[in-house]
Image (cartoon, rainbow, N blue to C red):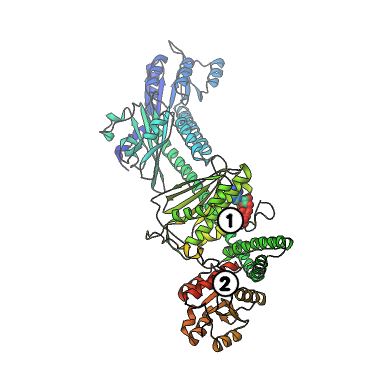
């Protein structure tokens, strides 16, 4: 420890003020006490005693009763007023019952008769000083109770300041803490204004507190720090009579500095005070450490709770996904039949009554197929095909797709898209599905509540992630529903209007993108959905998907085509329907329902086109391509595949490699017709049967 930062060693001995008008008595008391290690000052009158006590601090006064001028009792009363902690002993030759009672009232520790027995005097002095120490310890104990009974930072700072001023009899104190840069800032001050607090940051070694922060123990500064050798060159904020500056450490690491000052109290700090400050500093450090740990634990707990909820949600989704996957696939084929035949019926112009019925069947079947398609995108287990993509472009495309719906519902759009947004790693098609659901939800919420509104879409970067916000002016989502909205089939919409899958699909897709989706209330009501996505490492713009090719399928010309087509389809009703569509187009059609029959047909016949189910038992797309390649490689480009889940990346990869068209089930018959025409046009056949 640096000696220079301590007060003198003899300062530790208690100081006793002796007051007696008899010089011999003063000398006797002074000698006796000094020989026993006490520091004494002896005066001959009450007035002189009061003058002394105003200038310096004493642990105790030993006082005569009968003196000229102000008497003993009066002197003691005034001494107590100057220093409430001073211990008092009366030594008198003329004690009366009244004066004994009065001295008790003043809290005098002992009342000794002259001639004084030295042993009795020393015993009394020792006991009185012990009582004083006890009182101080009690104050420290009280302080520890006070500061350990709260863990809230702001409350704790206030209690530390108050307790420090009371224990060290100060009229000002401030608590400084170490910030993230290792600088000290004032967390709370009893006297400094908030503006000064905010502007005060000290590097270690700067100013008195900054310099003391580098010391291991509290430092006493009596008189002005500017005149103190130890702080040469340091400018203090304002003049002080005395200060104790305590470094606060936790496990050897500096966490702050506690400054305790006497600004108007004209009294120096002693070594005894410094020792009390040392105890105070270690209690304060412990309490600050506890509060900091508490805050950290709370944050961790929140994190664990959040990730626990996420795990539950993910598990729930997985279990439901497995169940729904089977259901969706089973529903696809019958739906295909219903839709296909309904469309055929509709086009064959039945009577108005039947037509009305067919329209209803078509509408409802389309609704059912939308549900199945949503179910499939929700349960899809494969990873998205991630590329660096420009989110703003995907948002713009999603908004364009919804533009007419938004207009009909009188929903305006404000797009606040960061032009410098980096690319994210994602699957453009899947993200467009997510944005589409969020736009539709916002539109429905605002339209149902107010018949109009504005949707604000914002993008920005935060913490190496891209944030995408959809804020609406609808009724918002009540707190109790906020976690549940991502659950499959959670809906508050009328029966038949919502299935409750939109947000579940969003959740599943965003999770596959290692992102997060959450909802919060907007500042002026409404709901804000926020998606977070990781930034792509290489900033490469997404190649604009060429939707045009898909969208502008060959026109629905009703010209007949003459081509020979093989339908490979296990499901009889779907097989019949395909045959019917193709025959109607003018094709010559063969159909096969199992793998052997299909292979046999390929071996024995010649076809301009094949329409095959991608997932036929024992003859999946790959096996079929092998069989075709063996028969005639030119057949490899003449297949149209039908698939239940067109978002399956394995299928997409297969389609990309083989170069064949894939049509999702259930399909629009016009899409099928166009696909057949496109294939025949591309292979230069169709106007007549070949081979
Ligand atoms: N922007 C929004 N404002 C208010 N409530 C919303 C909003 N978005 C979603 N919700 C609530 O969350 C529920 C679930 O939404 P989700 O998109 O999953 O299903 P849905 O819209 O009800 O049906 P669908 O399957 O047709 O999308 C909604 O029924 C609605 O209560
Ligand atoms: Mg929805």
Q: Residue at x 70, y 65 (%)?
A: 350
Instruction: Give SS at disc 2.
Output: strand
Which residue is found at the position 41% from the left and 26% from the top?
58
- Percent x, y for residue 651? 52, 72
Q: Nearer the viewer, residue 118 or 491?
A: 491
For this rendering, which residue is in front, 465 or 397?
Answer: 397
Q: Residue 286, image x and y in percent?
A: 47, 44
Between residues 635 and 625, which one lies in front from this camera angle?
635
Q: Residues within 10 Å of mark 2 (few under 14, many from 20)?
A: many
Q: Quadrant of residue 339?
A: bottom right
Q: Is residue 401 above or below residue 629?
A: above
**Residue placed under numbered mark 1 in the picture:** 503
The answer to whether 118 is drawn above or below residue 50 in the figure is below
Mark 1 Cβ inside 8 Å of ligand 1: yes
Q: How far apart are the two marked residues, 2 and 1, measured between alpha carbons? A: 25 Å
Mark 2 or mark 1: name the one nearer the start of the chain. Answer: 1
* Image vertical order of residue 494 relative to residue 581, above or below: above
Callout 1 secondary element = helix
Residue under numbered circle 2? 643
Q: Residue furthest top?
A: 69
């Amino acid at each position: 420890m640096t000696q220079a930062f301590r007060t003198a060693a003899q300062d530790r001995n208690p100081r006793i003020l002796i007051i007696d008008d008899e010089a011999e008595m003063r000398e006797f008391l002074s000698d006796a006490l000094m020989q026993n290690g006490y520091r004494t000052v002896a005066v001959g009158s009450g007035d002189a005693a009061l003058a002394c006590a105003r200038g310096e601090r004493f642990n105790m006064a030993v006082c005569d009763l009968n003196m000229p001028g102000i008497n003993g009792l009066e002197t003691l009363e005034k001494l107590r007023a100057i220093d409430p902690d001073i211990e008092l002993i009366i030594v008198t030759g003329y004690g009366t019952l009244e004066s004994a009672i009065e001295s008790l009232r003043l809290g005098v520790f002992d009342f000794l008769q002259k001639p004084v027995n030295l042993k009795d005097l020393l015993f009394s002095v020792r006991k009185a000083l012990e009582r004083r120490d006890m009182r101080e310890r009690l104050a420290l104990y009280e302080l520890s109770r006070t500061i350990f009974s709260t863990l809230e930072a702001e409350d704790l700072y206030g209690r530390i300041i108050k307790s420090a001023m009371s224990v060290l009899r100060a009229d000002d104190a401030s608590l400084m803490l170490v910030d993230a840069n290792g600088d000290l800032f004032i967390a709370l001050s009893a006297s400094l204004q908030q503006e000064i607090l905010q502007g005060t940051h000290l590097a270690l070694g700067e100013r008195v507190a900054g310099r003391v922060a580098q010391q291991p123990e509290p430092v006493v500064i009596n008189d002005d720090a500017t005149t103190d050798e130890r702080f040469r060159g340091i400018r203090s904020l304002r003049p002080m009579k005395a200060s104790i500056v305590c470094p606060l450490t936790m496990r050897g690491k500096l966490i702050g500095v506690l400054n305790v000052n006497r600004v108007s109290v004209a009294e120096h700090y002693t070594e005894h005070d410094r020792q009390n400050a040392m105890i105070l500093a270690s209690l304060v450090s412990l309490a600050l450490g506890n509060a900091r740990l508490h805050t950290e634990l709370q944050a961790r707990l929140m994190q664990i709770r959040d990730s626990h909820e996420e795990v539950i949600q993910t598990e729930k989704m997985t279990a439901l996904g497995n169940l729904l996957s089977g259901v969706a696939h089973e529903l696809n084929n019958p739906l295909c039949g219903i839709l296909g035949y309904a469309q055929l019926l509709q086009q064959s112009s039945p009577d108005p009554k039947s037509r009305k019925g067919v329209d209803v069947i078509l509408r409802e079947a389309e609704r059912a197929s939308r549900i199945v398609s949503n179910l499939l995108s929700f349960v899809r287990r494969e990873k998205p095909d991630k590329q660096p993509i420009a989110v703003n472009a995907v948002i713009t495309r999603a908004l364009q797709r919804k533009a007419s719906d938004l207009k009909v519902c009188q929903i305006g759009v404000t797009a606040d898209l960061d032009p410098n947004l980096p690319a994210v790693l994602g699957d453009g098609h899947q993200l467009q599905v997510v944005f589409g659901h969020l736009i539709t939800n916002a539109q429905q919420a605002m339209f149902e509540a107010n018949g109009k509104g504005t949707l604000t879409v914002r993008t920005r970067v935060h913490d190496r992630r891209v944030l995408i916000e959809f804020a609406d002016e609808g009724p918002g989502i009540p707190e109790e529903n906020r976690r549940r909205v991502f659950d499959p089939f959670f809906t508050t919409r009328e029966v038949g209007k919502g299935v409750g899958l939109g947000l579940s699909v969003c959740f599943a897709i965003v999770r596959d993108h290692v992102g997060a989706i959450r909802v919060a209330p907007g500042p002026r009501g409404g709901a804000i959905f926020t998606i977070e996505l990781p930034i792509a490492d290489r900033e490469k713009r997404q190649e604009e998907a060429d939707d045009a090719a898909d969208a502008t399928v060959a026109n629905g010309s009703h010209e007949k085509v003459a081509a020979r087509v093989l339908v490979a389809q296990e499901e009889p009703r779907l097989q019949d329907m395909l045959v019917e569509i193709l025959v109607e187009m003018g094709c010559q059609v063969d159909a096969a329902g199992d793998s052997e029959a299909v292979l046999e047909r390929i071996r024995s016949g010649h076809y301009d086109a094949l329409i095959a189910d991608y997932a036929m038992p024992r003859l999946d797309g790959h096996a079929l391509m092998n069989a075709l390649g063996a028969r005639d490689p030119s057949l490899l480009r003449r297949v149209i595949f039908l698939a239940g889940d067109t978002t399956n990346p394995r299928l997409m990869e297969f389609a990309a490699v083989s170069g064949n068209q894939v049509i999702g089930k259930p399909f629009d018959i016009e899409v099928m017709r166009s696909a057949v025409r496109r294939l025949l046009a591309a292979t230069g056949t169709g106007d007549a049967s070949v081979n």
